[in-house]
Image: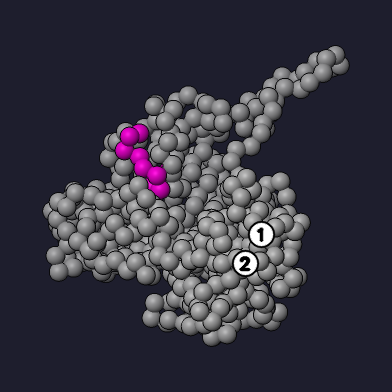
Amino acid sequence: MELKPNSPVKSIDARARIGLMAFVVSVLAACSSGSGSGDGNGGGSGGAPSQPSVSTIVPFVTLRPISAGEFRYNDDARVTVNGQPAALEDLHDGEIAVIQGTRLYKDGQLDSAGVASIDVSHLVIGPVESVDLDHARLSVMGHDVSVTGDTMVDDASVSAGGLAAIQPGDAVAVSGFFAEYGEIVATRISHRAADSAVLLRGTIVASNPAAYRFRVGQFDVYYGQADIDLSEFPSGVPQDGDRVLLRSKAAPLNETLDADSVAFLPRTLRLTENAEVELMGAMTRYESSELFDVAGLMVHVNCSTGACGSNWQSLRDNALVLVIGKVDTDGGVQARYVGSANEGPVALTAAVDAIEPGTQALTLLGFRVQTSVFTQFGDERVGGTTPGSVEDLQVGDVVTARGTYGGSPGLLIAASIQRVPVQDPWLATGRFQRADPAIVVLGRSILTNGSTMVDRCESPIDVQRFFSDKERIDALAIGLQATPAHSLEATWVSIYNHDC
């Protein structure tokens, strides 16, 4: 393994403006590309002779969605997909992989890194039972699957309409993150051949070793003829609570799956103590803000030794998080950082016009805000009671929903919903189109006119300058006003870029 170089926003109050600016800053940070770096050599001549450089090699592991192209120069890395040998060409954008290797530090600074292995895992491979474009959901092999706008469907994102390419009966492979009770938020969905073998990951319940049966999700699994290594199981046989990977040549019939192989999945990383760890996944088996699982791995948080995210203590079951730390003596993770994974490039603040308890969706100014089991709720009002779902909200409540475009006009897939103090509606985003005189956001047109106030970096400019190709815009915020014709008008527009 080779180591390689490594405004006119007067309509919102001060509290709301702080929240808007914090969101815009996060959008600008997310769209930053690259960073400058020096050569690491001390300048000048003369003086005391330089001290010998101290080098340290540290093993690392990271679990996250991948970009296939990032590994083009790692020809010596061992690649597997669902435990089977594969090649770099078999990797795809959005798949979840465990990446292992070593990092070389010189005088405490990262100098280079080498990748030893890339292990891709799918959560489920099998037939699609249903697809709901309006609510950004589908069902695959009995699993409820949610998507975000960034979820890849073959070569198109959901924001670009990729979900429409999936039909009931299609065979697909789903990469993503498990929630507490088996729901999935997908990072990639790939079509497979109609006669593909099926794959299922999950947790055993109702185990009956004498009959060679247990349940995973909604399926009754028979493993009497399966390839299985019982020595891998802590009890010598599959028991309730064990995590397993199942394969079968045939799709389930009448909710019964005849497994061809059963593999035990450990809850620890099985790595050297003090190896560096970076995990992205959903909080599960949540006991407290200091003790929970991520991706089935035990995480112990000690934020006194690190810089945890500003909202880490408010995160609950099924929050998608980034964890950074080291492997402990028990094979779990001692975390020095925990924070929300990227919530998405769109924030919408408005009063709730309608609530759909059955689909767990809200309507704000004609936008459909779709929640999932992964959506985190909060309350920013003084003395407010934190809602746990859309059913804890009321028509007229003002909320801020953050997330991604769902590919259907007006659909926002919410990563978080915060109830906030009463304020005029606004929208902030890093993804939009300019189509004079309209701004297109979430597939809807927001009209500007001669009375729309526009500022750039809080300095007023003419509205037509906004539509100039010469005007660089990295993010913007828009004051919203509904019209009698049920369209939207921009009362003000604030433009931001990295020069502000």
Along the line of sight, the residue nearer the viewer: 409 or 364: 409
Residue 381 circle label: none
Where's residue 344, x and y in %? 53, 58
Q: Quadrant of residue 241?
A: bottom left
Q: Does residue 298 sit above or below 375 in this rendering?
A: above
Along the line of sight, the residue nearer the viewer: 77 or 461: 461
Q: Is residue 289 visible?
A: no
Q: Residue furthest right?
A: 47
Residue 449 circle label: 2
Q: Which residues are magenta?
A: 88-98
Q: How is the image coloured?
A: one colour
Give SS at disc 1.
Answer: helix
The residue singled out by tag 1 in the image is 463
* Contact? badges 2 and 1 (CB < 8 Å): yes
Along the line of sight, the residue nearer the viewer: 494 or 140: 494
User: What residue is rendered at 42% in x and 31% in y?
Assistant: 72
